[in-house]
Amino acid sequence: MTALRMSAQDWMLLILLSLIWGGSFIFAKIAVAEVPPLTIALSRVALAALALHLVRFILHVPAPRDRAFWRDALIMGLLNNAIPFSLIFWGQKEIGAGLASILNATTPLFTVIVAHVFTRDEKAGPLKIAGVLLGMVGVTVMIGSDVASGLGNHLWSELAVLGATLSYGLAGVFGRRFRARPPLMVASGQLTGSSLLLLLPVLLIDQPWSLPLPGMRSTLAIISIALLSTALAYVIFFRILKRAGPTNLSLVTLLIPVSALLLGIVFLHEEIATHHLVGMGFIGFGLLLLDGRIFHFCRVA
């Protein structure tokens, strides 16, 4: 099978996707100042679901009618949206957008571990194991230094974001069952499922009718994270996936922290500590080992 290559247009789409997803951490940091995390998560998935269902209707993508799909869509929505979005938004009440994005970049590391445990055809070889170990070193450098320097009050927030990446890893393996379905159908289905799952917790815990109305800045941030960082991002995501394949698409994970760091510095005046950058370096090298193409380039050279 011929490996899919990245064209100039694919690279532009990949960079755009990293900016959109990096921007989601900026939007979230703005929104959590006024709106509870669960309410933000519900708003994000519900608005994005409506947008994607509209796109699906325009493109004449049929709505699935079988119960098995909607059962799996609920599980996928739980693992890929409801749990991770809620944990990340909760974590960002204490930590900055840049650090949250760096921790989120460990998603492929957890995916490798989950795939090794729960699948037969994606066992981790020496290269992947080395990549996971390097990534874990990076996480330890970031979080361990925070605890050692007396910033342990942020530990649970950092662990919450790591919990989100573990949930993403589980979702990545569970999502293999959707391979035969149109991507837009899966995306709209899982967002619908996560909206239903988040509705009751929001009503019971946040009681949004009792909350003060958020300001214009927070409202625009929530709309942006729903329509740009979720609905539009999925459209770009699946376009790259179709044109360049999943391996090339995974490179966006390396670009998101850089985008979020730069956006956080510019728009939120955040400061990133040296040990966070060192940790990101370890994670980056780990991801390169997981990707494997660095050794391919060395052999070619």
Image: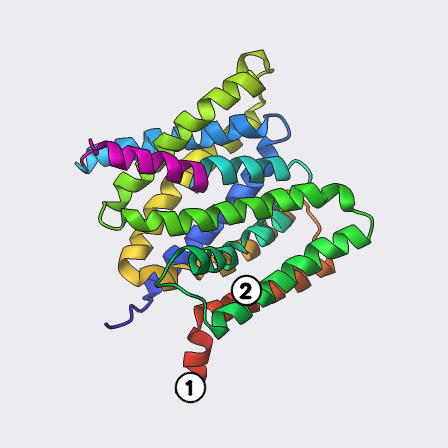
Asked whether 15 or 294 is in front, the reply is 294
Residue at 31%, 69% in the rendered image = 5
Residue 281 picture quarter? bottom right
Q: Is residue 111 visible?
A: yes
Label 1 Cα crowd, 10 Å radius (few <14 / some 14-19 / many 20+): few
Q: Mark 2 sits on what residue?
A: 132
Q: Indicate whether residue 68 is drawn in magenta.
A: yes
Asked whether 256 or 264 is in front, the reply is 256
Residue at 58%, 23% in the rendered image = 215
Quadrant where the C terminus is found in the figure: bottom left
Asked whether 50 or 137 is in front, the reply is 137
User: Which region shows up in magenta?
Assistant: 62-79
**What predominant SS class does the magenta segment belong to?**
helix
Q: Position of residue 147 (x, y in %)?
A: 77, 51
Label 2 Cα crowd, 10 Å radius (few <14 / some 14-19 / many 20+): many
Instruction: Specify the amino acid type for callout 1.
Output: Arg
121 up-or-down from 166: above or below? below
User: What's the distance in space between the residues labelled 2 and 1, CA to CA?
Assistant: 23 Å
Residue at 58%, 12% in the rendered image = 210
- Asked whether, in this view, residue 89 is left or right of residue 250, the answer is right
Q: Mark 1 sits on what residue?
A: 299
Q: Is residue 55 visible?
A: no
Q: Position of residue 69 (x, y in %)?
A: 26, 37
Q: Position of residue 163 (x, y in %)?
A: 57, 45
Q: Position of residue 187 (x, y in %)?
A: 33, 40
The furthest residue to the top: 210
Element under disc 2: helix
